Amino acid sequence: MMEVRLSPNRRAAQRGVSLVEILVSLVLTVLIVGAVSRVYLSTKSGFFTVENMNWVNENARFALHRLGYDIRMAGYLGDLQDYWNLGETASPPRQLRTVSGECFTTTPGGDEFRWVGPMLYEDSLTPANQAPKLLIENGAGSNFSGCITTGSALQEHRAGTDVVSSHYLDSNRVTAGSALNEDDIYARVDMRDGVAFQCHTDGTGCIPPDGPGAGEIYPVMAVTYYVTSCGRTGDDGVCGTADDIPSLMRVRLWKGGVVSRERVADGVIDMQIQYGKDTDGDGLSNAYLASDSSFRDPASWPMWATMKAVRVWLLLRVREPSYTDPTPSYDYGGVSTIPESGYRYELFTTTFAVRNQFSDGPAM
Protein backbone atom coordinates (compact mmCIF):
# COMPACT_ATOMS: atom_id res chain seq x y z
CA MET A 1 0.00 0.00 0.00
CA MET A 2 1.29 3.41 -0.89
CA GLU A 3 1.89 5.71 2.10
CA VAL A 4 0.77 9.30 1.67
CA ARG A 5 2.83 11.87 3.46
CA LEU A 6 1.73 15.45 3.98
CA SER A 7 4.13 18.19 3.36
CA PRO A 8 5.09 20.40 6.29
CA ASN A 9 3.09 23.27 4.76
CA ARG A 10 -0.07 21.14 4.56
CA ARG A 11 0.31 20.09 8.17
CA ALA A 12 0.72 23.71 9.26
CA ALA A 13 -2.44 24.73 7.42
CA GLN A 14 -4.54 22.24 9.37
CA ARG A 15 -3.39 23.26 12.82
CA GLY A 16 -6.08 24.46 15.37
CA VAL A 17 -6.29 27.86 17.12
CA SER A 18 -3.65 28.39 19.70
CA LEU A 19 -4.37 29.19 23.35
CA VAL A 20 -2.94 32.69 22.93
CA GLU A 21 -5.28 33.39 20.03
CA ILE A 22 -8.28 32.17 22.05
CA LEU A 23 -7.37 34.43 24.97
CA VAL A 24 -6.89 37.42 22.69
CA SER A 25 -10.28 36.86 21.04
CA LEU A 26 -11.97 36.49 24.43
CA VAL A 27 -10.44 39.71 25.68
CA LEU A 28 -11.55 41.58 22.55
CA THR A 29 -15.06 40.13 22.88
CA VAL A 30 -15.30 41.20 26.53
CA LEU A 31 -14.09 44.69 25.67
CA ILE A 32 -16.62 45.06 22.85
CA VAL A 33 -19.51 43.70 24.93
CA GLY A 34 -18.49 45.95 27.83
CA ALA A 35 -18.37 49.02 25.61
CA VAL A 36 -21.78 48.24 24.10
CA SER A 37 -23.21 47.62 27.58
CA ARG A 38 -21.86 50.94 28.86
CA VAL A 39 -23.38 52.77 25.91
CA TYR A 40 -26.70 51.00 26.48
CA LEU A 41 -26.76 51.69 30.21
CA SER A 42 -25.73 55.30 29.70
CA THR A 43 -28.44 55.77 27.08
CA LYS A 44 -31.02 54.08 29.30
CA SER A 45 -30.02 56.21 32.30
CA GLY A 46 -30.16 59.37 30.21
CA PHE A 47 -33.57 58.42 28.84
CA PHE A 48 -34.82 57.65 32.36
CA THR A 49 -33.55 61.02 33.61
CA VAL A 50 -35.10 62.94 30.71
CA GLU A 51 -38.38 61.06 31.12
CA ASN A 52 -38.52 61.86 34.84
CA MET A 53 -37.69 65.53 34.34
CA ASN A 54 -40.27 65.80 31.56
CA TRP A 55 -42.79 64.31 34.01
CA VAL A 56 -41.82 66.94 36.59
CA ASN A 57 -42.02 69.81 34.09
CA GLU A 58 -45.38 68.70 32.74
CA ASN A 59 -46.88 68.40 36.22
CA ALA A 60 -45.50 71.79 37.28
CA ARG A 61 -46.85 73.48 34.15
CA PHE A 62 -50.31 72.03 34.68
CA ALA A 63 -50.33 72.84 38.41
CA LEU A 64 -49.39 76.48 37.81
CA HIS A 65 -51.99 76.73 35.06
CA ARG A 66 -54.75 75.57 37.39
CA LEU A 67 -53.53 77.69 40.30
CA GLY A 68 -53.18 80.74 38.08
CA TYR A 69 -56.73 80.51 36.76
CA ASP A 70 -58.33 80.26 40.20
CA ILE A 71 -56.11 83.00 41.68
CA ARG A 72 -56.85 85.41 38.83
CA MET A 73 -60.57 84.69 39.05
CA ALA A 74 -60.71 85.34 42.82
CA GLY A 75 -63.31 88.01 43.53
CA TYR A 76 -64.95 87.90 40.10
CA LEU A 77 -68.62 88.77 40.65
CA GLY A 78 -70.00 88.83 37.14
CA ASP A 79 -71.90 92.05 36.39
CA LEU A 80 -71.82 93.26 40.00
CA GLN A 81 -69.85 96.50 40.28
CA ASP A 82 -70.53 97.27 43.95
CA TYR A 83 -68.09 94.70 45.27
CA TRP A 84 -69.51 94.58 48.81
CA ASN A 85 -73.18 94.26 47.81
CA LEU A 86 -73.50 90.47 47.51
CA GLY A 87 -75.69 89.05 50.27
CA GLU A 88 -77.53 85.84 51.08
CA THR A 89 -81.19 85.41 50.22
CA ALA A 90 -83.66 85.75 53.09
CA SER A 91 -86.12 83.40 51.37
CA PRO A 92 -86.17 80.28 53.63
CA PRO A 93 -86.49 77.58 50.95
CA ARG A 94 -83.46 78.98 49.14
CA GLN A 95 -81.06 79.85 51.93
CA LEU A 96 -77.55 78.40 51.95
CA ARG A 97 -76.99 75.19 53.84
CA THR A 98 -73.87 74.26 55.74
CA VAL A 99 -71.69 72.08 53.52
CA SER A 100 -70.39 68.87 55.08
CA GLY A 101 -66.61 68.83 54.90
CA GLU A 102 -66.26 72.46 53.89
CA CYS A 103 -62.84 74.02 54.31
CA PHE A 104 -63.55 76.50 57.08
CA THR A 105 -66.52 76.52 59.37
CA THR A 106 -66.14 78.97 62.24
CA THR A 107 -64.19 82.03 63.27
CA PRO A 108 -62.03 81.86 66.43
CA GLY A 109 -64.98 83.28 68.35
CA GLY A 110 -67.31 80.56 67.11
CA ASP A 111 -69.27 82.68 64.65
CA GLU A 112 -70.48 81.08 61.44
CA PHE A 113 -67.98 81.22 58.61
CA ARG A 114 -69.27 78.87 55.94
CA TRP A 115 -67.53 77.87 52.73
CA VAL A 116 -69.24 80.67 50.81
CA GLY A 117 -68.87 83.12 53.70
CA PRO A 118 -66.12 85.13 51.97
CA MET A 119 -68.51 85.76 49.06
CA LEU A 120 -71.07 87.51 51.24
CA TYR A 121 -71.35 90.95 52.76
CA GLU A 122 -74.36 90.12 54.92
CA ASP A 123 -72.69 87.49 57.06
CA SER A 124 -72.99 86.88 60.79
CA LEU A 125 -69.46 88.09 61.47
CA THR A 126 -68.86 91.18 63.55
CA PRO A 127 -68.29 93.69 62.10
CA ALA A 128 -70.53 92.66 59.23
CA ASN A 129 -68.39 93.41 56.20
CA GLN A 130 -66.85 91.63 53.26
CA ALA A 131 -64.32 88.86 53.93
CA PRO A 132 -61.47 88.55 51.42
CA LYS A 133 -62.07 86.24 48.47
CA LEU A 134 -58.45 85.17 48.13
CA LEU A 135 -57.18 83.54 51.33
CA ILE A 136 -53.64 82.36 52.10
CA GLU A 137 -52.47 80.37 55.08
CA ASN A 138 -48.71 80.07 55.40
CA GLY A 139 -47.40 76.84 56.80
CA ALA A 140 -49.97 75.48 59.20
CA GLY A 141 -53.17 75.20 57.20
CA SER A 142 -55.03 75.20 60.52
CA ASN A 143 -57.67 77.64 59.30
CA PHE A 144 -58.76 75.10 56.71
CA SER A 145 -59.21 72.24 59.18
CA GLY A 146 -62.73 71.53 57.92
CA CYS A 147 -61.45 69.90 54.71
CA ILE A 148 -57.77 69.26 55.50
CA THR A 149 -57.36 66.77 58.31
CA THR A 150 -54.96 64.09 59.50
CA GLY A 151 -57.41 61.23 59.12
CA SER A 152 -57.22 60.43 55.42
CA ALA A 153 -54.07 60.28 53.31
CA LEU A 154 -55.56 62.48 50.59
CA GLN A 155 -56.77 65.00 53.15
CA GLU A 156 -53.55 65.18 55.14
CA HIS A 157 -51.77 68.51 54.85
CA ARG A 158 -47.98 68.33 54.46
CA ALA A 159 -46.51 70.29 57.36
CA GLY A 160 -44.90 73.60 56.48
CA THR A 161 -46.54 73.95 53.07
CA ASP A 162 -48.92 76.80 52.25
CA VAL A 163 -52.64 76.70 51.51
CA VAL A 164 -54.60 79.03 49.23
CA SER A 165 -58.36 79.37 48.75
CA SER A 166 -60.23 81.32 46.07
CA HIS A 167 -63.88 82.40 45.78
CA TYR A 168 -65.54 83.74 42.65
CA LEU A 169 -68.50 83.41 40.30
CA ASP A 170 -68.04 81.08 37.37
CA SER A 171 -67.55 83.05 34.16
CA ASN A 172 -70.04 80.73 32.41
CA ARG A 173 -73.33 82.29 33.40
CA VAL A 174 -76.51 80.26 33.36
CA THR A 175 -78.30 80.52 30.03
CA ALA A 176 -81.60 82.38 30.29
CA GLY A 177 -84.51 79.98 30.72
CA SER A 178 -82.30 77.02 31.75
CA ALA A 179 -83.32 74.95 34.77
CA LEU A 180 -80.98 75.16 37.77
CA ASN A 181 -79.38 72.08 39.31
CA GLU A 182 -80.78 70.84 42.61
CA ASP A 183 -78.66 71.86 45.65
CA ASP A 184 -76.17 73.82 43.54
CA ILE A 185 -75.18 77.25 44.88
CA TYR A 186 -75.71 80.28 42.64
CA ALA A 187 -75.64 84.08 42.75
CA ARG A 188 -77.97 86.40 40.87
CA VAL A 189 -76.40 89.79 40.27
CA ASP A 190 -76.83 93.01 38.35
CA MET A 191 -74.56 96.05 38.41
CA ARG A 192 -75.66 97.26 41.85
CA ASP A 193 -76.98 94.30 43.80
CA GLY A 194 -76.60 90.55 44.19
CA VAL A 195 -77.94 87.64 46.20
CA ALA A 196 -76.55 84.12 46.75
CA PHE A 197 -78.96 81.20 47.01
CA GLN A 198 -79.18 77.42 46.85
CA CYS A 199 -81.77 75.31 45.05
CA HIS A 200 -83.50 72.77 47.29
CA THR A 201 -85.95 71.57 44.66
CA ASP A 202 -85.59 70.04 41.23
CA GLY A 203 -84.31 73.38 39.94
CA THR A 204 -87.62 74.98 39.04
CA GLY A 205 -88.90 77.94 41.00
CA CYS A 206 -85.76 78.31 43.13
CA ILE A 207 -84.75 81.82 42.05
CA PRO A 208 -85.16 83.99 45.19
CA PRO A 209 -87.66 86.85 45.09
CA ASP A 210 -85.39 89.20 47.04
CA GLY A 211 -82.61 89.34 44.45
CA PRO A 212 -82.25 91.69 41.48
CA GLY A 213 -85.21 91.12 39.20
CA ALA A 214 -83.33 91.25 35.92
CA GLY A 215 -79.90 90.04 37.01
CA GLU A 216 -77.77 87.29 35.51
CA ILE A 217 -77.26 83.97 37.34
CA TYR A 218 -73.79 82.51 37.92
CA PRO A 219 -72.61 79.34 39.70
CA VAL A 220 -70.63 80.06 42.88
CA MET A 221 -67.07 78.68 42.87
CA ALA A 222 -64.96 77.97 45.97
CA VAL A 223 -61.65 76.09 45.72
CA THR A 224 -58.78 75.33 48.09
CA TYR A 225 -55.29 74.09 47.14
CA TYR A 226 -52.88 72.28 49.46
CA VAL A 227 -50.02 69.76 49.35
CA THR A 228 -50.44 66.24 50.69
CA SER A 229 -47.58 63.88 51.51
CA CYS A 230 -49.25 60.89 49.86
CA GLY A 231 -51.21 61.81 46.76
CA ARG A 232 -50.21 58.42 45.37
CA THR A 233 -48.71 55.42 47.09
CA GLY A 234 -45.41 54.00 45.95
CA ASP A 235 -44.64 50.44 44.90
CA ASP A 236 -45.71 49.06 48.28
CA GLY A 237 -49.23 50.48 47.90
CA VAL A 238 -49.18 51.94 51.42
CA CYS A 239 -49.20 55.59 52.53
CA GLY A 240 -46.77 56.66 55.20
CA THR A 241 -43.72 54.95 53.73
CA ALA A 242 -40.60 56.28 52.05
CA ASP A 243 -41.79 55.86 48.46
CA ASP A 244 -45.00 57.92 48.79
CA ILE A 245 -45.54 60.40 45.95
CA PRO A 246 -46.54 63.87 47.25
CA SER A 247 -49.21 65.76 45.31
CA LEU A 248 -50.93 69.10 44.94
CA MET A 249 -54.61 68.66 45.83
CA ARG A 250 -57.68 70.78 45.17
CA VAL A 251 -60.87 70.79 47.21
CA ARG A 252 -63.85 72.46 45.60
CA LEU A 253 -67.49 73.20 46.10
CA TRP A 254 -69.06 70.85 43.55
CA LYS A 255 -72.44 70.13 42.06
CA GLY A 256 -75.18 69.41 44.56
CA GLY A 257 -73.48 71.55 47.20
CA VAL A 258 -70.99 68.84 48.13
CA VAL A 259 -67.21 68.80 48.57
CA SER A 260 -65.11 67.22 45.82
CA ARG A 261 -61.42 66.43 46.28
CA GLU A 262 -59.14 65.91 43.29
CA ARG A 263 -55.44 65.42 42.66
CA VAL A 264 -54.10 68.26 40.51
CA ALA A 265 -50.45 67.24 40.01
CA ASP A 266 -48.14 64.56 41.38
CA GLY A 267 -44.61 65.22 42.55
CA VAL A 268 -45.37 68.55 44.28
CA ILE A 269 -43.53 68.38 47.59
CA ASP A 270 -43.89 72.03 48.63
CA MET A 271 -45.92 75.14 47.83
CA GLN A 272 -44.93 78.52 49.24
CA ILE A 273 -46.95 81.69 48.63
CA GLN A 274 -46.37 85.40 49.18
CA TYR A 275 -48.79 88.19 48.39
CA GLY A 276 -47.97 91.52 46.79
CA LYS A 277 -49.22 94.35 48.98
CA ASP A 278 -50.25 97.77 47.70
CA THR A 279 -49.30 100.22 50.46
CA ASP A 280 -49.71 103.53 48.64
CA GLY A 281 -52.96 102.98 46.76
CA ASP A 282 -51.50 103.12 43.25
CA GLY A 283 -52.81 99.65 42.37
CA LEU A 284 -49.33 98.09 42.22
CA SER A 285 -47.53 95.77 44.62
CA ASN A 286 -44.86 97.45 46.71
CA ALA A 287 -43.65 94.41 48.63
CA TYR A 288 -44.16 90.66 48.75
CA LEU A 289 -44.99 89.28 52.17
CA ALA A 290 -45.96 86.02 53.79
CA SER A 291 -49.29 85.85 55.58
CA ASP A 292 -48.72 86.61 59.24
CA SER A 293 -52.31 86.82 60.44
CA SER A 294 -55.50 84.80 60.24
CA PHE A 295 -57.99 85.74 57.54
CA ARG A 296 -60.74 84.80 60.00
CA ASP A 297 -59.97 87.87 62.05
CA PRO A 298 -62.03 90.75 60.59
CA ALA A 299 -59.32 93.14 61.76
CA SER A 300 -57.01 91.61 59.14
CA TRP A 301 -59.40 92.10 56.21
CA PRO A 302 -58.13 95.58 55.25
CA MET A 303 -54.69 93.97 54.86
CA TRP A 304 -56.05 91.30 52.54
CA ALA A 305 -57.89 93.94 50.52
CA THR A 306 -54.53 95.47 49.53
CA MET A 307 -53.41 92.25 47.80
CA LYS A 308 -52.63 92.94 44.13
CA ALA A 309 -50.50 89.95 43.18
CA VAL A 310 -49.63 86.45 44.37
CA ARG A 311 -46.20 84.86 43.97
CA VAL A 312 -46.17 81.06 44.01
CA TRP A 313 -43.25 78.65 44.36
CA LEU A 314 -43.73 74.95 43.60
CA LEU A 315 -40.98 72.47 44.46
CA LEU A 316 -41.36 69.13 42.67
CA ARG A 317 -39.39 65.89 42.82
CA VAL A 318 -39.17 62.85 40.55
CA ARG A 319 -41.18 59.70 41.23
CA GLU A 320 -38.35 57.29 42.05
CA PRO A 321 -35.02 57.69 43.84
CA SER A 322 -32.41 57.11 41.16
CA TYR A 323 -29.72 59.80 41.36
CA THR A 324 -28.34 62.59 43.49
CA ASP A 325 -29.67 66.12 43.08
CA PRO A 326 -26.86 68.47 41.96
CA THR A 327 -28.29 71.32 44.07
CA PRO A 328 -27.42 71.03 47.79
CA SER A 329 -30.42 73.14 48.88
CA TYR A 330 -33.31 75.13 47.43
CA ASP A 331 -34.03 78.57 48.92
CA TYR A 332 -37.36 80.18 48.04
CA GLY A 333 -40.28 82.02 49.61
CA GLY A 334 -38.51 82.40 52.94
CA VAL A 335 -37.80 78.67 53.37
CA SER A 336 -34.91 76.33 52.55
CA THR A 337 -35.28 72.69 51.48
CA ILE A 338 -32.54 70.05 51.28
CA PRO A 339 -33.32 67.36 48.67
CA GLU A 340 -33.95 63.86 49.96
CA SER A 341 -31.23 61.37 49.17
CA GLY A 342 -31.60 59.85 45.72
CA TYR A 343 -34.28 62.28 44.46
CA ARG A 344 -33.91 64.95 41.82
CA TYR A 345 -35.80 68.20 42.53
CA GLU A 346 -36.91 71.13 40.39
CA LEU A 347 -38.13 74.56 41.57
CA PHE A 348 -40.73 76.60 39.67
CA THR A 349 -42.03 80.08 40.42
CA THR A 350 -44.37 82.62 38.86
CA THR A 351 -46.44 85.64 39.86
CA PHE A 352 -50.16 86.05 39.21
CA ALA A 353 -51.99 89.36 39.11
CA VAL A 354 -55.04 89.62 41.38
CA ARG A 355 -57.45 91.12 38.88
CA ASN A 356 -60.71 91.42 40.82
CA GLN A 357 -59.55 92.66 44.21
CA PHE A 358 -60.88 96.01 45.34
CA SER A 359 -59.49 97.92 48.27
CA ASP A 360 -62.38 100.38 48.45
CA GLY A 361 -65.76 99.68 50.02
CA PRO A 362 -67.49 100.06 53.37
CA ALA A 363 -65.37 101.28 56.26
CA MET A 364 -63.47 98.47 57.94
Image (cartoon, rainbow, N blue to C red):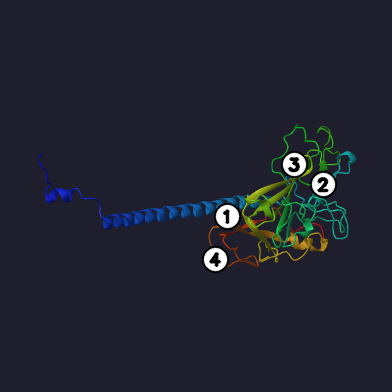
Residue plotted at (81% across, 57% down): 362
State the residue position of label 4.
Answer: 327
Viewer-side label of 4, 3: 4
Residue plotted at (74% across, 34% down): 176
Q: Earlier in the sequence, mark 1 or mark 4?
A: 1
List x then y, in percent, for residue 247: 65, 53
- On residue 320, which mark appears? 1
User: Where is the N terminus found, in terms of image quarters?
Assistant: top left
Q: Earlier in the sequence, mark 2 or mark 1?
A: 2
Q: Amino acid at mark 2?
A: Ser
Q: Earlier in the sequence, mark 4 or mark 3?
A: 3
Q: Amino acid at mark 3?
A: Tyr
- On residue 218, which mark appears? 3
List x then y, in percent, for residue 359: 74, 59
**Which residue is the extreme one toward the left?**
2
Q: Earlier in the sequence, mark 4 or mark 2?
A: 2
**Which residue is the extreme one toward the front?**
1
- Classify mark 4: residues with Cα within 10 Å, few (<14), some (14-19) or many (20+): few
Q: Amino acid at mark 4?
A: Thr
Q: Earlier in the sequence, mark 1 or mark 3?
A: 3
Q: Earlier in the sequence, mark 2 or mark 3?
A: 2
State the residue position of label 2.
Answer: 100
Residue plotted at (56% across, 61% down): 342
Element under disc 3? strand
- Classify mark 3: residues with Cα within 10 Å, few (<14), some (14-19) or many (20+): many
